[in-house]
Image: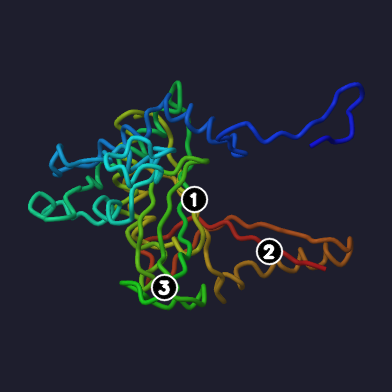
Amino acid sequence: MEFQSLGRREVIGRFDGGRITSDGGGLLLREVDQRIGLLDRLAACFTDHRNPESIEHSVRDLVAQRDLTGERRVREQDRGNPLAASSTLNRLELGIPKSAISDRYKRIAADNEAMDRLLVDLFLESYRKPPRKIWLDLDATDDPLHGQQEGRFFHGYYRCYCYLPLYIFSGEHLLCARLRTADKDASSGSVDELQRIVGQIRARWPKTRIIIRADVGFCRDAIMAWCETNDVGYVLGLARNKRLQRALGKEMEEARLACERTGEAARCFRDFRYRTRKSWSCERRVIGKAEYLP
């Protein structure tokens, strides 16, 4: 198939290239995996109780799903079907550690604690030397459901039936992904995860300053108190209320006048001490923003 020439070069389309892919990024991912050993290390987080003589797909193969041609399949009728069937993957995904050794089918058990440690280890290894300061970002989001899945609840904020997983990132590095049902507070389980992650980081980087950052859903006394006790900084969103609005009354008026004078958005800030009447155990620093828009 010929196309318009590019200068003195002919442009021809041919279809005899064999098995190729337009997803060249897969090659880069493979190189990264080979350097950091991600798939091998993830596979090591599973215990395989299957009979070795009956195994066609190793745990490493199941994690990677990279038998592209299926030429290594034992049975002739399976050759050409490259990936493990759903029933085989179920044995990986649904195995229960306590019963896997005696279970007839689901004989692969995951070590969840080892997988949690692996995420943080990969983050630590990405630095050549300990940084002076790191930020840990906490967030919850919706994982919508479309059937009668176990633990199905309606979430008023997201207006759908969903799960409510908790994520903790540092930059682009995922440190925690915890699946939760949607009948929980956005911050549920955060202290336990922070205690685990911060402990693992400080064992390697004892002098690194750690600060957490999150929206108003994580502005809870238990989280702030834990941070204060363990020398972890925090920047958390704070929901507005009438007391805070009164405290920012002067700044709000200044922002209004500035907006009317310039025709552009105006912001004023106030740094003050504040404590809720019931939910907080002590007085804390609050930075209030008074904003007025055209």
Q: Given the image, on which type of amino acid does mark 1 rest?
A: Arg
Q: Given the image, on which type of amino acid does mark 3 rest?
A: Arg
> What is the residue that sits farthest to the front in this orientation?
76
Where does the image place residue 259, in percent across and percent down from the top left? 83, 64
> What is the residue that sits farthest to the left in this orientation?
102
Could you say which quadrant of the image residue 47 lies in? Answer: top left
Using the numbered discs, state the Cα–Cα distance from disc 2 to disc 1 in whole angstroms. 21 Å
Query: Considering the numbered disc 2 on the image, is that residue within a helix, a strand or a loop?
Result: strand
| Residue at 71%, 33% in the rendered image | 14
Would residue 3 be found to the left or right of residue 208 on screen?
Answer: right
Give the numbered dot on residue 213: 1
Give the numbered dot on residue 290: 2
Label 3 or label 1, whichever comes before in sequence order: 1
Select label 2 or label 3 by which is in front: 2
| Residue indicated by mark 3 | 277
Where does the image place residue 273, in percent across and percent down from the top left? 50, 59
Q: Given the image, on which type of amino acid does mark 2 rest?
A: Ala
Q: Is residue 134 above or below residue 90?
A: above
Could you say which quadrant of the image residue 106 lies in? Answer: bottom left
Query: Considering the numbered disc 1 on the image, is that residue within a helix, a strand or a loop?
Result: strand
Using the numbered discs, state the Cα–Cα distance from disc 2 to disc 3 in whole angstroms. 22 Å
Using the numbered discs, state the Cα–Cα distance from disc 3 to disc 1 in whole angstroms. 24 Å
Select label 3 or label 1 by which is in front: 1
